Image (tube, rainbow, N blue to C red):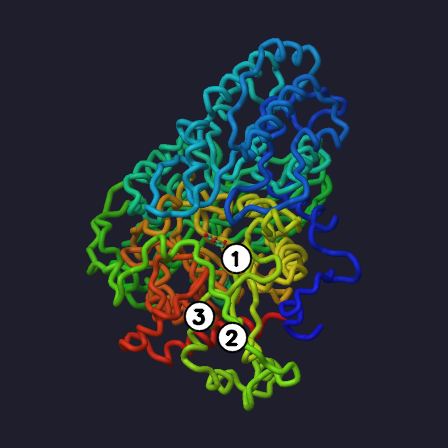
Amino acid sequence: MEKWIRARYQPNLPLNGSQRVTASPEHIALSRRAAQEGAVLLKNDGNLLPLAPDTRVALFGKGSFDYVKGGGGSGDVTVAYIKNLYDGLKEEGVSLYEPLSDFYRDYVEKRYEAGDVPGLMAEPALPQDLVDSARENADVAVIVLSRFSGEGWDREPVFYQEPDYPWPDELNMPRKAKDIFPRGDYYLTGEEQRVVNQVRAAFDKVAVVLNVGGVVDVSWFWEDDRISSALLAYQGGMEGGAAIAALLTGKANPCGKLPDTFARDLSDYPSTEHFHDSPHYVDYTEDIYVGYRYFETLPGAAEKVCYPFGFGLSYTSFSLEVLKAGEENGTVQVQVRVRNTGDRAGKEVIQLYFCPPRGLLQKPVRNLAAFRKTGLLAPGESETVELTFAVSDMASFDDLGKIAPSAWVLEKGRYALYVGNSVRDAVELDYAWEQAETEVLVRLSASMAPSHLSKRLLGDGSYEDLPAAPAADTVENLFQPLTTAQAEGVAPATPGRGRYMLAQPYAPGVQPLSAVAEGRLSLDEFMAQLSDGDLIHLLGGQPNVGVSNTFGLGNLPEYGVPNLTTADGPAGLRIQPEVGVCTTAWPCATLLAASWDPELPAQVGAAAAAAEVKENNISVWLAPAVNIHRSPLCGRNFEYWSEDPLLTGKLAGAMVRGIQSQNIAATVKHFACNNKETNRKYSDSRLSQRALREIYLKAFEIIVREEQPWAIMSSYNVINGQRASESRELLTTILREEWDYAGLVMSDWWTRGEHYKELLAGNDLKMANGYPERVEEAIKLGAISRADLEICARRVLGLILKID
Ligand code: BGC
């Protein structure tokens, strides 16, 4: 097909042959397999699971029908159907106690008719006679709990919004959530607790299924002998219920591992106490001690964990034998033989952690260095896996210059290595890396230092004072900033082209962009033809075309520049329901992370998401989203992968590879520190340079260095006083100069940043629309030059040239 032909004519053609790939049976089957691969078996006392053949099951909880396929907002997907657990178990031929299911089906249908969305409805009171009759007619009780959260609000909602904010759901949803979950949806509601009490009093065989987007309270079954089994099924996409049924019946064997630590209580996470101190800022006082780095390191914190990072059971068992461990040319290599010692086929995940010497910079005592998932091993079968990582990956960032200022340093001493199948079960190897002398690996500039974070946590539980950098003026601007009413939800203008002859589509002398694509013209020569106004036009979002609803880029028809459109991401190609095109809903990113298998997101990204994106004539997919799970309370955690940057970077990086293998642009978002949704366009994330480098930027760095994504989306929030989209230190010094990023940076949709300031920072494209008149004014005032515009325009055109 001729270049950009889909984007120009929007032909509604299948990508391959006569069959559309969008929501094809193959894609839906892959979505279901993915949902199986990431579910985590948390508990299985007495091997209650898998259910013995002919087990009669009673399904409790409105979650048995109210299945939540994924979270809300831009991470939502329009689908033809959703399979809940009832549907899934019926397909597997499991005998269910129907009167109980009738009760829940009726209730859920009525609530949906009344306007409730999946996961945001109260648990109905359960009549005791229904429990008694279920007890008479079933052998095993399965309790299903579901949860929903979404963009623009957090899981312990507070109601804070700018005046004139035009998106009512960002207040309606949290209000609803607060009514249903008065303590926040982390905990069971009173009604859910009553159902649990009724069921465990009546049944001695009880299993729990959690259909959730992230970390929730698990202490109630963790310490309860009357509940034998628990499956953390996450939000598994459109076929999630079928995937869970396959796991409960033993058709598939759980092989997911936790990408996050599950503690006893919400208050055990160091981020909880101050999460909602202010809608205007968040102090990241826990510093680098996020997730297991906190729970494994801080004195007394280990006892607060119910299920540690990396943990997950199987219906079979495995033995691990370390065959070799050593270092060659700066790479540590560990070889492990994994044997299936049980009686069912299964997969295991081998995890390698390092414990650095304490040194002058205190450090977490466990850090994930490498991991590998085996193939499906038959009983008795073994596989040898090799885990490798660079010695330099063990470096720490010295932001206070204890060894060298703003440098990655490897302190001298013993770096012990641990191998196992969770952070807790990893066993120390005989081999350790001995760093003879403290080494400064690379010196960088001090960037993005905090001005308002006075102290940070250290590994021994004490706090260290932080010097205050000069405060940035967040709102400094040549112009009166736009108000919310002027800036939020504005659609780009649709400029007309005027009359032209079809036989002579371009003005005399104009060479179209296709001449660059065909190698007849350099990009610089092409850009030399453009006026300042043309360049500015390229630096803002463009109108929707076809099925897109998140706008486009390019769109200079006088010069043959197509309008390439964007779409969300990340749970599938999101097309507005009214368009009538259904797509595949994939499992949420946290579930994909729990697979610990890069192959899986690579397949989801390629065969699926990008192919569907392309088939629907869209060119830029707004995924993956790789912010770190700092707190269980962040409303968008379901879109993000893990508390660990390496797991996030490797798996989301594989997704980027998959997407771009189809010549569709991946957009890695939200760069950076967008770890809270409340007041997200203003909230200031205050953190040390060390936490920024080691935790919050690390996944982005891994993806940039290893996969060179074509696009990155800067985030809405402020970081240490500077808007992310206006931060030159973030978007140019760190991203481009340090990491050699060559792609495009776009803003998130309708930021509060000023267009000319964003361009100067290296944010090339303002979405969803630009403000040409303000940029022109800034040129007149001498604040920005044509050369500055060319830098950004070159990246916009560079991206367009990569698309088919
Ligand atoms: C979200 C982005 C999304 C964009 C376009 C924003 O509100 O933060 O993740 O890609 O909208 O829908």
Dot 3 and dot 2 residues touching (CB under 8 Å): no
Q: CA distance from mark 2 to mark 1?
A: 19 Å
Specify the amino acid type for callout 3.
Answer: Leu
- For the residue marked with disc 1, what is the amino acid? Thr
Q: CA distance from mark 3 to mark 2?
A: 10 Å
What's the amino acid at mark 2?
A: Leu
Task: Estimate how packed mark 1 is, as few (under 14), some (14 to 19) or many (20 or more) residues with alpha carbons within 10 Å.
Answer: many
Image coords of residue 353 (percent x, y): 47, 49
Nearer to us: label 3 or label 2: 3
How far across and down, in percent of the image, does residue 452 sit?
22, 52
Question: Where does the image place residue 676, in percent across and percent down from the top left?
Answer: 38, 45
Closer to the chain start, of discs 3 and 2, is 3
Question: How far apart in space, not on screen, are marks 1 and 3 (Cα)?
Answer: 16 Å
Q: Earlier in the sequence, mark 2 or mark 1?
A: 1
**Name of the residue lying farthest toward the bottom:** 509
Q: Secondary structure at mark 1?
A: loop
Residue depicted at x 65% and y 43%: 347
The residue tagged 2 is 797
Residue nearest the observer in this picture, 319 or 746: 746
Q: Nearer the viewer, mark 2 or mark 1?
A: 1
Name the residue rendered at 32%, 39% in the picture.
Answer: 276
Q: Is residue 605 visible?
A: yes
- Would the CB of label 1 be found within 8 Å of ligand 1? yes
Check the image and report above or below for 457 versus 134: below
Give how far across and how far down residue 470 sits, in percent: 20, 60
Seen as rendered, the residue at the extreme front is: 499
Indicate the quadrant where residue 557 lies.
bottom right
